[in-house]
Image (tube, coloured by chain):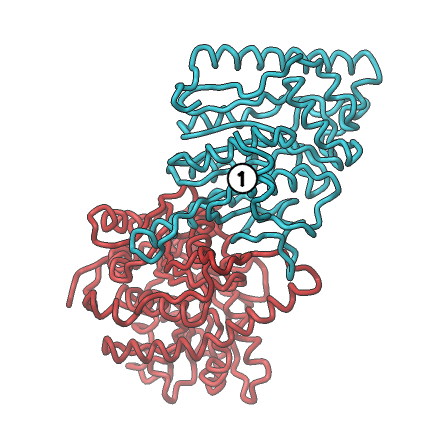
Amino acid sequence: MARLKELCKNKELFSKGHRACAGCGEALAVRQILLAAQEPVVTIMPTGCLEIFSSIYPESAWQVPMIHTAFETAASTASGVEAAYRFQKKMGRLKKDIKFIAFGGDGATYDIGFAALSGAIERRQRFLYVCTDNEAYMNTGIQRSSATPYGAHTTTSPAGTKVPGKRQHRKDIVEVAIAHNIAYAAQTTVALWNDLVTKVQKALATPGPSFLNVLVPCPLGWRYPSSETIRVSRLAADTCFWPIYEHQSGYKITYEPKTKLPIEEFLKPQGRFSHLFKDESGKKIIREIQDYIDEKWALLHKKQAAFPMPQAQV
Amino acid sequence: MILAKTGNEAMAYAMRQINPDVVAAYPITPSTEIVQLFATYVNDGLVDTEFVPVESEHSAMAACIGSAASGCRTMTATASQGLALMHEMLFIAGGLRLPITVPIASRSLSSPLNIHCDHSDSFASRDSGWMQFFAETVQEGYDTLLQAVKIAEMASLPAIVSIDGFILSHCMERIDVLNDQDVRDWLGPYKPNYNLLNLEHPILIGPAALQDYYFEFKRSQIEGMRNALPVIKQVTQDFNQLSGRAYGIVEEYRCDDARAVILLMGSACGAGRAAVDKLRHEGKKVGMVKLRVFRPLPHGLLKKTLSGFKTIGVLDRVDAVNSYGGPLYTEITSLLYDAVEKPRVFSYVYGLGGKEFTPEDAEAVLRSVLTGKKEELVTYVGVR
């Protein structure tokens, strides 16, 4: 359990003055994660919002080493960096222990960089991969990704007169990571700062690859006022749209909402779902979303009951 | 020491001697063996290398970039579709000025799928900011790979060393190898320009640079490629001292008093030499020019070498699909445009997809060059 009083004394490794939109969930997540990871870290990022708002030459928001290569290459570049580290350690050229964190958006992680991520986890490359998931390609202007939820409007899954937004459910990337026998995998969101910080520290302490999926609301792409990021993020957890859990040789739900809110509470403030509130067909889609969430939430409880995380790791 | 080695074995042997810090690689015909042999060196403890058996060539080059940016001497090996899949990352390695060295067993690009030799793969990567060397023989491939590591590090540029797929990669040759210690002493330790893992001076590698800086970055990279030519010259001379084997950037074969010459790269130079010998025996004034270094293009040297001849046949083992002749041909005609004595230059495309290029084919080309007349823009040698 992290304490805010202590956390705020840590050195800011992601400095202010970057060019993110007001209310950007991704910038908050990166700042919090680096506050949690005070040991020597070296970071890797693919092309995307984060790269654009943090690294336009000759400026940089990074107070830690950072490398960016291409869009689909966070995990593969990290693999090379980590191999270089292992080589220099074994040859006695490097003394300090270094931890590696790769940050990728959902497009870079679920879609274009998926094979590279899978390969790196299978090879047991030792790094924490953080997916800052805002559920669409925001950097290019809000196109659907395989992380975009059912029913959402994006510019390539528009709410049209015939087709009301995205017709498929999102890919369950954390389960995919778990299927790799990954050392540690977890999901959280930026509003739950303590949960996020704790999971980052757990992941970094794990010998082997780890994966953390962080829901980072995007005011521009989700179409809500920029002051509402944390509230929207919390609603994602409280409606169980975004289950907050971890997996380390077993499942543990780390956040149980006191009252599980109806999904409308999460959908309503966001312009990307506004078409669902206009008529009966939209309401039908909302019911489908609710059913899907309920089913997934129940399934997660079943998994937790059947395969609980060993006490030593809780 | 004299050994019998195929091209792939010789490249792997050189890599064992180089003992790179990191190798990230993926199998592909016809270069698979290089990676395969190297993996046995790793697992038998013959090298110190960290080996990363990645899940694609794209990831291989991304991992090589990560490793080289983290201060490690880094290599991979590939060919054809593999080099094509790396394409995006080649530009990034070039832009970051990382001296990654890559032996390739040159192979055609699909479709139709074909595993045999031509130069489509390396030519498609022409403008990616990599130096490109082409070897005529297995011996030259081995020697050039050793040179390329040193050149790459001195010039801060990545380098491709091509041996022709199957023709050299799978052909056994008697080669003279250096001893391990001589290679290691000659190369010395890698001194990177920058290192991501330097915690005392954290740096950002690979920023975005927009209208205000991008062009300046690129201009400096272009200058770096230009500056590589004297480095290549120096390292080639140093290597001569070490091994007793002399190489040029542009090499001439029986070109004294020649009127007509053919210009070639790679293994086909062997057929070229045989054809020149035959025609010389008949008293014809012919010769061959071999280009070893395609990037940086030694245009000053080429202009000096070529402008004295009456006619030149430029042989491309790749086509640019309805450009004004083969891609090497267009470069040669461009650089000769302002020559005082302009030779006539003819374009021949040969050997795509491993189509055999025999001494007889080379002879037919040479005879046609000698006539000084040619009707069609491009002659496709040996196509039915």
Q: Nearer the viewer, residue A261 or B25?
A: A261
Tell me if A162 is positioned left or right of B177 in this view.
right
Look at chain A in the picture and name its colour: cyan
Q: Position of residue A63 (x, y in %)?
A: 57, 53
Q: Nearer the viewer, residue B316 or B226?
A: B226
Mark 1 surroundings within 10 Å by alpha-carbon count, few (fewer than 14), some (14 through 19), many (20 or more): many
Q: Position of residue B242 (x, y in %)?
A: 24, 77
- In the rendered image, the quadrant that contains the C terminus of chain B is bottom left
Asked which secondary structure carries label 1, the reply is helix
The residue singled out by tag 1 in the image is A36
Q: Nearer the viewer, residue A241 or B328?
A: A241
Q: Give me the chain letter of mark 1.
A: A
- Report which quarter residue B243 is drawn in: bottom left
Look at chain B in the picture and name its colour: red
Tell me if A262 is positioned left or right of A198 in this view.
right
Name the residue rendered at 30%, 69% in the picture: B188
Q: Position of residue B126 (x, y in %)?
A: 51, 62
When the figure is inspected, residue B58 is found, relative to residue B203, above or below; the finding is above
When the figure is inspected, residue B371 is found, relative to residue A191, above or below; the finding is below
Q: What amino acid is labelled 1 in the image?
A: Ala
Tell me if A216 is positioned left or right of B36 in this view.
right
Residue B360 visible in the snapshot: no
Name the residue rendered at 53%, 15% in the picture: A300
- In the rendered image, the quadrant that contains the N terminus of chain B is bottom left
When the figure is inspected, residue B54 is found, relative to residue A270, above or below; the finding is below
